[in-house]
Amino acid sequence: MRGRRLAAALLTAVTVLGAGTACGIADAGEGSVADKDALVIGVNGDQPGLGERKGGTTFEGFDIDIAKEIARRLGVTGANVTFKQVTSATREKMIQDGDVDLVVASYSVTPERKVKVSFAGPYYVAHQDILVRESDAGKIRGIDDLKGRRLCKVPGSVSFPRVHDEQGVPAVPVEADGYAGCLTELTESRLDAVSTDDLILAGLAAKASGNGPPLTIVNAPFTDEPYGVGLRRGDADGCEAVNKAITQMYQDGTAPRLLNKWFRPAGLKVTTTVPQFEGCV
């Protein structure tokens, strides 16, 4: 009797294990963004010129236009494309949890982030620079001039650590929820500078034009910031499909047109050639 019970238990265990293994194999081949009929795309909502919420679920900016183009070239259009707001602190978790299929949100590719998610692209390589009030332009000419000055820090963003930790410049952190908050702090003189990607700074400067003190970009870039499209780790098919879409956008002039549309008015010189891709792994 005892032997029959043991045999039955072993058979049940093998059956459950086999079902779990089969399920794992099936799941491994499903869910690629290359095969989806609808896409949820994570975007910023507080970065003028890149990704800015305009009420409800409406967003506008360069990243929004890029996201729409990628989706269209993947065969997904109209109401089948949904935007969901992300922040620098929530992007990885929202991809990992399946809350979004893609993230197009001034998302710099870093080794630390590549451990958690996969990246297609980049679709543009920005450069970290510094935004100051025009009246302070003579005092802050480069990164070394940020020593002892109040510099905006956004949780989850690598921009402040690049100045303070990587470059060893002892700037004083002033925390804000996002770069819209940084802009308010700067125009109201509660900090001395904002340092992040030049595309973000150009959008902030344009947003502030005519409201408060005039702002200026220092034009002293000190990093490369490859903007990648974040997607579920291991989705190689989706990565390749997005890379193909990005390549087509540069070849047919769509990407250069969008760059000029959003950033030429701010006086920023943009690069209009296809960036070097990171590779899909």
Image (cartoon, grey):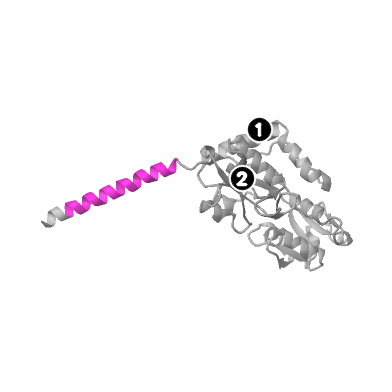
Q: Nearer the viewer, residue 97 or 274?
A: 97
Residue at 72 percent of width and 47 percent of height = 61
Q: Is residue 184 above or below residue 48?
A: below
Q: Give the Cα separation between the discs numbered 1 and 2.
A: 15 Å
Amino acid type assigned to the residue bearing label 1 in the image: Gln
Q: Is residue 118 above or below residue 190?
A: above
Residue 134 in view of the camera: yes
**Residue pointed to by mark 2:** 229
Task: Give the extent of the magenta segment.
Answer: 6-29
Q: Decide which of tag 1 and tag 2 comes sooner along the chain.
A: 2
Asked whether the residues under the numbered discs 1 and 2 touch, taking CB atoms below 8 Å apart as contact, a structural biologist would say no
Quarter where residue 2 is shown: bottom left
User: Is residue 44 toward the left or the right of residue 10 in the image?
Assistant: right
SS label for mark 1? helix
**Label 1: how many residues lie within 10 Å, few (<14), some (14-19) or many (20+)?**
some
Residue at 40 percent of width and 42 percent of height = 26
- Residue 56 position, x and y percent, is 66, 54
User: Is residue 212 toward the left or the right of residue 168 in the image?
Assistant: right
Residue 270 in view of the camera: no
Helix, strand or loop for the magenta stretch, by majority: helix
Amino acid type assigned to the residue bearing label 2 in the image: Val
